Image (cartoon, grey):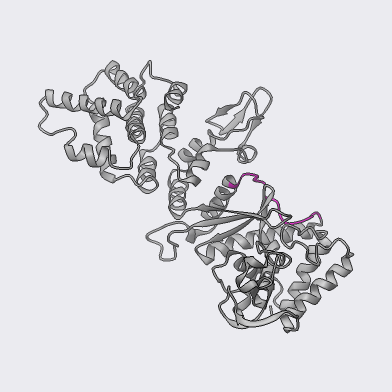
């Protein structure tokens, strides 16, 4: 790219403008001799001649989508507009500060025909001082023009990605640009890249996987000075089409990213086994999961991860919404050995549970297991599973305290401070504490290779939780 002015590429904080900038940077690296206008010509040719002007969800009522124009007219009118921007000859211009770049310069109207998620000219009361639209610099509007090459469709809406770290944003946008241009080169492309994922949650986790697997600096490593801290992913899921433009922001938080990267890096086999068995698809009838092969199967067929990864997954949904998955971990731990380190990291970082609470729960699980017969342990687990309220759980713990006292142990099992501040702190949910105690018990039984009869099965636990 011949121009060196970074107004076309430097990050601004506006996700739409920044994606356009990353696309320009990618195209500039690919075609270093092309000017900005020549890159506009390149993109225009793709939009109109390769994609048949199917950009209604981006630039509504623009020269590109104008049905009264033939292809050549669409190209000439589009190039005329953007050449006018570059040469600063377009009408309806004013001087002021660009709302995006913050520079004092000539400003031009931004509406739904050349900018996404803006009000149309008919709704002038939406804008300051009854202006005919947002007023942005030529650099901002030109960057917006390149957005369709840096995004993809997830379901029926466009997914625009952004991270709080420029390196991660650039990495993800470059992937989309390469895939879009690859499809154009194949001659089979009819529009913006369509993700294989129709569910936003699955798509976001796949992007996190892509970063973790291919971008070393995205993985937290205290010994690596280049490792990025607190990586967060945002997806703007939007459409600018028709009378009902819509946008929803989905956030893959930095805390979730760190936890997910930790699991994938250190406990990949255990974590994947837990996640994969929770994929659901209503049309795949009588489904069973083969743990050893990580496959879903029924009487007719077997499906590997590449087939079922697009299904709905309640665990991934809850993680993205920051809802507790402790109940699911409890059910899983009943029959599967699962590192308690994963559970501990999850509780401390995502549920904001105190470390001492977890330590106390470990002590309680030891007390329930040590020097007891199989029958006594089974009864304790059945009792825990059957608890219906916080009052029942409190009574269960009080009986343990009494038992510890009657055996004349020199140390109290639970102090008043433990009880009030750590086992039942303000804002906590008793089932999380109960389930965590069960998980600790189950995992210690697995470690001891102790198999108990007459334990409630998964269905019974589900019923109790409901």
Task: Kindly identify the residue that appears in the image at 62 percent across and 83 percent down.
Answer: 105
Give x and y (percent) for residue 87: 74, 84
Task: Kindly identify the residue that appears in the image at 53 percent across and 33 percent down.
Answer: 277
Q: Quadrant of the N terminus?
A: bottom right
Give x and y (percent) for residue 123: 68, 64
Residue in front for this viewpoint, 224 or 14 = 14
Residue in front for this viewpoint, 306 or 81 = 81
Visible residue check, residue 21: yes
Visible residue check, residue 4: no
Q: Quadrant of residue 11?
A: bottom right
303 in the magenta segment: no
Residue in front for this viewpoint, 70 or 214 = 70
Tell me: residue 456, above or below residue 122.
Answer: above
Give x and y (percent) for residue 231: 47, 58
Span shown in magenta: 188-200
191 in the magenta segment: yes
Give left or right: position of 429 versus 397: right
């Amino acid at each position: 790219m011949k121009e060196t002015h970074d107004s076309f590429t430097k990050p601004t904080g506006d996700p739409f403008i920044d994606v356009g900038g990353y696309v320009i940077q990618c195209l500039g690296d690919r075609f270093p001799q092309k000017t900005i206008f020549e890159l506009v010509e390149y993109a225009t040719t793709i939009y109109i001649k390769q994609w048949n002007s199917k950009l209604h969800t981006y630039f509504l009522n623009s020269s590109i989508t104008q049905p009264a124009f033939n292809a050549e007219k669409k190209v000439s009118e589009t190039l005329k507009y953007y050449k006018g921007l570059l040469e600063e000859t377009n009408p309806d211009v004013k001087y002021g500060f660009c709302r995006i770049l913050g520079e004092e310069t000539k400003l031009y109207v931004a509406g739904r025909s050349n900018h996404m998620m803006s009000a149309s000219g008919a709704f002038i009361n939406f804008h300051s001082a009854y202006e005919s639209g947002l007023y942005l610099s030529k650099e901002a509007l030109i960057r917006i023009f390149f957005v369709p090459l840096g995004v993809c469709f997830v379901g029926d809406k466009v997914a625009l990605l952004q991270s709080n770290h420029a390196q991660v944003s650039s990495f993800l946008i470059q992937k989309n640009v390469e895939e879009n241009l690859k499809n154009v080169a194949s001659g089979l492309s009819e529009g913006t890249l369509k993700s294989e994922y129709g569910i936003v949650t699955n798509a976001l986790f796949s992007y996190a996987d892509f970063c973790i697997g291919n971008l070393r600096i995205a993985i937290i490593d205290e010994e690596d000075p280049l490792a990025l801290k607190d990586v967060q992913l945002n997806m703007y899921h939007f459409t600018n089409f028709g009378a009902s433009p819509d946008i929803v922001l989905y956030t893959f938080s930095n805390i979730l990213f760190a936890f997910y990267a930790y699991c994938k890096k250190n406990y990949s086999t255990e974590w994947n086994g837990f996640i994969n068995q929770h994929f659901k698809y209503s049309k795949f009838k009588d489904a069973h999961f083969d743990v050893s092969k990580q496959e879903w199967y029924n009487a007719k067929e077997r499906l590997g991860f590449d087939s079922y990864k697009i299904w709905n997954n309640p665990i991934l949904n809850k993680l993205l919404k920051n809802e507790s998955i402790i109940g699911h971990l409890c059910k899983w731990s009943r029959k599967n050995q699962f590192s308690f380190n994963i559970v501990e990291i999850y509780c401390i970082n995502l549920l904001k549970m105190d470390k001492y609470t977890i330590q106390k729960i470990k002590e309680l699980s030891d007390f329930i297991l040590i020097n007891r017969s199989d029958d006594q342990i089974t009864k304790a687990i059945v009792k825990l599973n059957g608890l219906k309220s916080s009052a029942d759980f409190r009574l269960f713990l009080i009986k343990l305290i009494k038992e510890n006292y009657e055996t004349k142990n020199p140390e109290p099992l639970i102090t008043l401070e433990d009880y009030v501040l750590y086992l039942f702190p303000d804002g906590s949910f008793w089932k999380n504490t109960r389930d965590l105690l069960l998980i600790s018990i189950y995992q210690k039984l697995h470690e001891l290779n102790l198999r108990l009869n007459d334990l409630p099965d998964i269905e019974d636990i589900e019923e109790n939780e409901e």
